[in-house]
Image (cartoon, coloured by chain):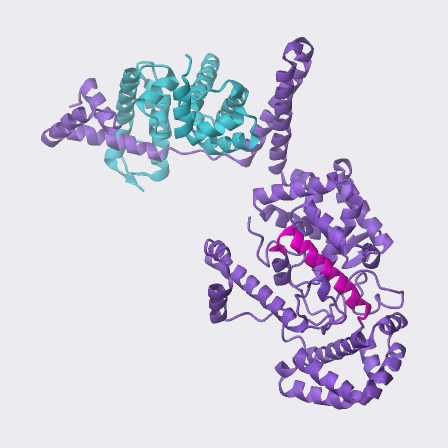
Amino acid sequence: MAISESTAQRYTAQDPDVRLMLQVRDDDAGAFEELMQRYQSRLVALMTHLVGKQDLAEDLAQDVFLRIYRARKRYVPGSKFSTWMYTIANNVASNALRGLSRRKEVNLVGTESGELGGNPLAAKALAASGLMPTRQLDKAELSEVVKIAVSTLNERQRMAVLLNKFEHLSYEEIAEVMEQSPSAIKSLLSRARANLREVLEPYLQQGAKL
Amino acid sequence: MKSSPEQLERIVAYLDGELSAEESAQVEQQLASDEQFRRELQSAQRAWSALDQLPMPHVGDDFSNTTMEMVVDAAQHDLEAKTIALPIQRRKRNTTNILLLAVTVLLAALMVRVIAQNPNRRLLADLPIIQNVDIYSQFESVNFLRDLREYLGEDVTSYTLSAEQLASKLEEHQLISDSDQRQDWLESLDESEKTSLRGKFNRFRELPDSRQQELRTLHQEIAAADEQEQLLPTMYVYQQWLNELEPSEQYELREQPDEQQAEDAATGIKRFLEDRTFELTPEQLRDLFRKAFPHMMRLKRAMDQQLESNPQNMSPEKVRRELMQLLRDNPKEFQRLQELIPQAVPPDVGEAFKQLDERQQLEQVRAWFLQHLHQMERGRRAGSRGRGAARPTEEELQNFFVEELDPAQKERLLALPTDQMQQQLIGLFQGRRARQRWKDRDGSPRWGRPEDRRGPQEGAPRLRGQPPPGERFGPPPNGDRGLGGPGRMLDGPPRGFEGPRGRRPGYFEEEEGPRRRRRAEGPRPEDVPPPREE
C-alpha cells in the first residue's frame, strides 16, 4: 500500500526513531547502531518469550536487524518505527516457530483455541515445575510460574500480549504488526488474558513472598 | 461465576484504555454497582500485573558486536553485488556510483563501529591518534601548526631536537601511521612503553565520541598536509615547550583562538630557547657564585636574612631593585663581573653572555641570582611544598568568578557539575594569575608577544618564582652540558625533581635504544587543567 507524503511527514515529525531510520536509509551507520542499542534488549526479550530459548531469540533478533538494514533503501515511514520493526519481528518469529514446530522443538505451545482446559501441556508443565498453588511463592517461583503461564498461550496470543504489555502497542498497532483487524486483536487479547488468569489466579490468591 | 467472553473483552479493553469515553463510563458505572464485575476486573488486573515478574533476558556485548559484524558483511555483499552488476547498468552509472559511494562510506563507518567494540582492535585502529592524544588535544586544526611554523620563522627544530631525536620521532610516526606495521610496532614496546600507551589509550577512551572524532580528523589533516615533514617537527617542538608549562598555563593557552595560540606559543618557544642558553645546573650555579660573586656577598647576606625571616618578601621585583642599585652604585664591580662570569660558567654560556648587551647582561646576572636564591629556598623547604600554584580561597574564587569572567565563561561553568565547575574555575584562576604575574614582571605574558622578548625591556628570563625546570628543553648546546646536569632529559630522572609536575604532554623524558620512552605516568591535558569546551 502506497504511503502518502503527509503520512510520512507526520511520522517523521512525531517519531525520533523514524528520523533515525531515515538516517540509516542515507547510510548513516551511527544511526543504525543507535537504533540497535535502543531496541536490542526489548527485541531479544520479545523473541525469548516467543520461542523459549535465548540463544535462538538472539539469532532471530539479529535476523530482524539485518532485515531492517537490508530494507533501509525501501523504507518509507508509514507507521511508528517500532511498529514497522515488530512487523518484521513477527514475520521472523512466525517463520522460526513454524520451523521449530515441524521439528517438534517447541513443546509448550497452547492450542489454537487458546483455552487452557484443552491444553494438558500447561498443567503438565506446572506440575513438573513443582510449583503448586498450595503455598505462598517467592519472587523467583512466581517468575517461573508467570513464564510457564505465558508459554501456555498460543503464538498469536503470546505476541499480542507481549506487544501490549511490554511494548505498549495499542490494539491498532498490534493489528498492523499482526496483519489483523483491531477487533480481532481485541478478542485475541481478551482470550489470552483469560488464559493467563486461569493459570495464574490460584497462585495469585495465595499471594507472593516478594 | 466467570464472566462471559464479551464481558471479559470489555474489562480487558477498559483496562487497556481502548474503550471510548462512553463505553468507559458504562464500565465504571457497572463497577460501582456490580460486586462480581468488580472482582472480575480486579482478578484480570492481578494476572496482568503478574506479568511484570516475567524474567527479562540480559543481552551481552557480544550481541551488538556480532550484529554489527553481520551488517558489515551485508554491506560488503551489497558492494560486491553492485560491482558485479556495474557492466549491465551503464545507463544508470551515475546512480550506481552514488550507491557504491554510499555503501563504501557505510562499510567504512560500520567497520569503525565494530572496531570500537573491541578494545584491542580499537587501539590498533586509532593508534596514531592515541599515541599523539596529548599533543593533538592541545590544538584544534592543522592550521595551528602552519601558523606556529610561520611564527617561529626559523628552523628552531635544530635547536630543540637533535637529528637523531627527530629522525626517531618521524620514524615512529610513520610506523604507527601505517596500519600494516602497527602490530609490529606495538609488539616492540617494552613494559614501560606499553604502560605509557595504556595511559594514553585510557585518556583517549575517556574523551567524548565527538572529541575523539575531532582528533581523528586532525590526524588525517596533518597526514594529508603537503608540508607534513615540516609540521610534525613543529608539533614536537611545541609539545616539548608545553612540557615546561603548568597545567593552568596550558589551559590558558588552549583557550585562545588558534592563531593567537600559535603566536603566543612561538614567542614562548623562542624565549625559552634564549633562556635555556643561560641555564646552569645547581653545581654550575654554585661555582659561579663562588668564583664571580664573592664581592656581592653583602647583598647575598641581606637576601639570606630576608629569606630566613620571611621568604614571601623575596619578591623578584625587590631582588631586581636591590641588585640594580648595588651594581649602579659600583660600576667597576659590574665590569669585573663581566670579565669573571665568562670564566666561571661553561664556555658556551660564557660566549653567549659576552654577546649580550650590557642591559641584557645585567638581567642575566639578576636571573642567576634569583635562581640561586630559589635554589636555597627550595633546599629550606625540603620538599614540604609542592610547586603548583597556591589554591585560591573560596572568597578569591567568588570574586574572580563575579568580576573577571565574561558571561560566556560563567554560563559554561554554571552548566557543569559542582566539582567540575570548581576544578575548572581554579584552573582559570591560577592561569589568569600566572599571566598577571608575568605581566607584572615583564609587561607581557610568559609566552608574551614578540616585541616583549627579552632584551631592552626589563624582564628576567626563566623567572617564574620557581626553580629552573628539571627537564631540559631539547638537546644540550654542547656535549659538556646537559646530560650531567639538571637539564638532562634522556638519562633517568632529572635532578631537583620534586615529584610529578602536573599532567602535561610528555616526550623525551628519557631514551633507551632507538626509540624514546614516553612518560610512564602520562600527561592529562584533557583532565587537569580542564578540557577545552566541547
Name the residue: 60% across, 64% down: B431
Residue A143 in sight: yes
Task: Chain letter for purple, please.
Answer: B
Q: Main secondary structure of the magenta part?
A: helix
Q: Is residue B410 left or right of residue B175?
A: left
* Magenta-highlighted residues: B254-279
Measured as percent of width and height from the top left, residue B438 is found at: 65, 69
| Vertical order, B308 against B254 (above or below) | below
Name the residue: 24% across, 25% down: B12
* A14 or B507, nearer to the observer: A14
Q: Is residue B269 left or right of residue B105?
A: right
Measured as percent of width and height from the top left, residue B469 is found at: 73, 68
Q: How many discs appear?
A: 0
Measured as percent of width and height from the top left, residue B426 is found at: 54, 64
Measured as percent of width and height from the top left, residue B442 is found at: 68, 71
* B525 or B302, nearer to the observer: B302
Residue B448, located in which quarter of the rendered image?
Answer: bottom right
| Vertical order, A192 against B159 (above or below) | above
Chain A, which colour? cyan
Magenta residue check for B337: no
The residue sitting at the bottom extreme is B298
Residue B472 in sight: no
Residue B154, located in which quarter of the rendered image?
Answer: bottom right
Q: In this view, does B79 lie to the left or right of A132?
A: right
Quick one: quadrant of the N terminus of chain B?
top left
Name the residue: 86% across, 53% down: B163
The residue sitting at the top extreme is B88
Q: In this view, does B406 lie to the left or right of A148?
A: right
Magenta residue check for B270: yes
| Vertical order, B330 against B150 (above or below) | below
